[in-house]
Amino acid sequence: VAGTINEGGAEAEVEMRLRSEPVSAVVLNFAVDLGDEASLSHFSHTFTPGDWMNFKTLTITGLDDPEVDGDIAVLVSTTVASTDLAFNGIAVPDVPLTNFDDDVAGLVFNPTLAFLALNPLTTTEAGGQAFVDITLASQPSANVVASLTALNPNEGTVSPATHTWTPTNWANPHRVIVTGVDDFV
């Protein structure tokens, strides 16, 4: 196996050929145990008495998901079918791979926190408002609740103070309204 796979679409390749000439066609059938973690470039390769010595390549590609599910072990299995009894049903070792996770848990702000660090939100003491939209960085397995408060409630308030995302609405933005407060100074 050459290469590793990950949720970013990285590929691994397996090159194969037969060790000896068959009497008839030999079909190698491939399957992946977790089809939501990896895909195969081919579901089979056929070797004939005329091309048995030529290498053929199977490409395994890591698939993305929106969940923080960790690195997942993937197994590619091969079965062999042929009317040539020397090849029919022979055992082929499975190919173990790991699909490396690229998801992280967290909040995503729009505008971004980097932008806000250079361009803070501006409100007025007359009740002027500014807005920030928040989503989750990845799909959770359970509800996520974020509670927000103003660092100085005498200068501004945050509304709504609580935001809940579910595994189905995690990518929907929640608008946060920051309202200026008159501190009478």
Image (spheres, grey):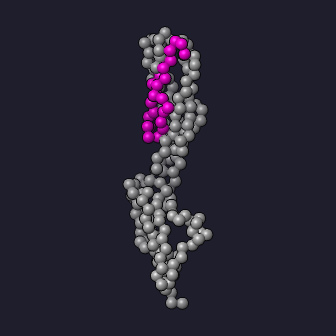
On the question of residue 111 being in view, the answer is yes
Q: Residue at x 46, y 47 (%)?
A: 65
On the question of residue 98 being in view, the answer is no
Q: Which residues are magenta?
A: 28-52
- 33 in relation to 71, above or below: above
Relative to 12, 134 lies left or right: left
- 68 in relation to 16, above or below: below
Locate the C terminus and report the quarter of the image it occupies: bottom right
Front residue of 67/48: it is 48
Residue 55 at x, y percent in the picture: 57, 22
Front residue of 142/65: it is 65
Q: How many numbered badges does the structure rendering display?
A: 0
- 131 in relation to 18, above or below: below
Relative to 17, 175 lies left or right: left
Q: Residue at x 50, y 59 (%)?
A: 106
Locate the N terminus and report the quarter of the image it occupies: top right
Residue 89 at x, y percent in the picture: 44, 18
Residue 87 at x, y percent in the picture: 48, 15
Q: Residue at x 46, y 25 (%)?
A: 44
